[in-house]
Structure formats: structure tokens, C-alpha cells
Amino acid sequence: MHDRQVFRENRRAREFESFVAGAAGRLLRAATLLTAEDPDANPRARRLLTLALGHTYARWHRLRGEDPYDCARQYLAVRFARTAWHRPWVPGRARPGPRGPLAALTAQERLVLVLRVYEGIAEERTAALLGFPPERVRAICDRAVSSVLHPVRPPGPRALGAKVAPS
């Protein structure tokens, strides 16, 4: 009996290691996009990834046909949403400003955009995961895509000799 249990645990560990080898890079990229950190300096994204993989490993023997990537991605998204929306910033606590490609977006916009565009999750599934109506997911996604494709640029310096319009 003991040998069989050891064999199962070893097989579980090998299967999980194989999953991590194939999925960790993409999950880390998704987490980095969510946190809007620089890809070379992303401690919050790495923490999200570690928590998602730990959660997935804890459920590994109960997945039974479920996609482990989907399980990890769902945990990653929900954990990000909880920490981004429900933990207000505390004055005096250092928090590096977002610098990644989606830094101009709100946390909600980043989450919807990453799930819909980067991960390719259907609108209805994204809505169910976040507890939003599909119309709201569509509106958030449209606004986020528009903001990324057409960013608002701060006014630059005026050209020399340019006339100022009368007020």
C-alpha cells in the first residue's frame, strides 16, 4: 500500500512539473500584464504566479479532466481582482508605479483585456468569472482596447514660431 502511494505522489509531482514547464511562462506573462509591471522587474506578478501554481498543485489530484491551465489562470485572475479592487492603497506604503504596456489602464480594464485578448477567453466566460454582465465586459474591453490603440498623449512642447490661438 505504501509503495503505491509513493508511486502516485511521484507521478503527481512529475505531471505537475511538466505542466509548470509548459505553462509557467505564459501565466507569468499574463500576470505581468495584469500587474502592469516591467517584464524584467515584476515581483507582484511572480507572487501571483506562485500563488496560482500553489493553488493548482493543491487541487491537482482533484482536477479529473479539468484543464490545469484554466484552473491556474482562473485563480490568477480572481486573486488579482481581489487584491487590486479590494485592497486600497495605504499612504506611506511604497508601491511602485505601473510601467508595463498596459500601465495606463485601470486594474479592471487590464483584467478584462488580458482575459479577452491575451488569453482568448469568450466574453460570456469572462463575465461569469468576474460576476459581470456580458455587456459590461464588452464595454470595458472596448474601452481598454481603444485606450491601448489610441493613447491620450500629454501635450508636447509647441513648435518654435507657432501661433497661439486667441482665447
Image (spheres, rainbow, N blue to C red):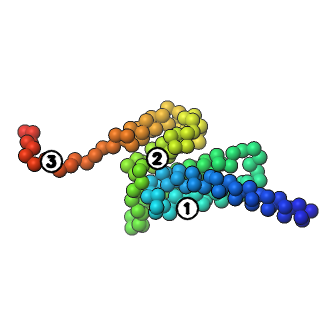
Residue at the (84%, 61%) spot, across then down: 7
Pick the quarter of the image with the C terminus: top left
Q: What element carries label 1?
A: helix
Residue 110 numbered tag = 2
Q: Where is residue 94 in the image (x, y as percent from the top left)?
A: 41, 66
* Callout 3 amino acid: Arg
- At label 2, counting other C-alpha atoms closer than 10 Å, the crowd grade (few under 14, some 14-19, many 20 or more) is many
**Disc with the residue nearer the chain's start (2 vs 1):** 1
Residue 58 is left or right of residue 135, and the answer is right
Q: Distance between the residues labelled 2 and 1?
A: 18 Å
- Evaluate whether residue 79 shows in this view: no
Foreground: 159 or 52? 159
What is the secondary structure assignment of the residue under circle 2? helix
**Mark identifier at residue 26:** none
What residue is disc 1 on? 47
* Camera-side mark, 1 or 3: 3
- Identify the residue shown where x is 9% and y is 39%: 165
Residue at numbered disc 3: 158
Front-lying residue, 129 or 103: 103
**What residue is at 25 percent from the left and 48 percent from the top?**
154
- Residue density around tag 3, few if under 14, some if 14–19, many if 20 or more, within 10 Å: few
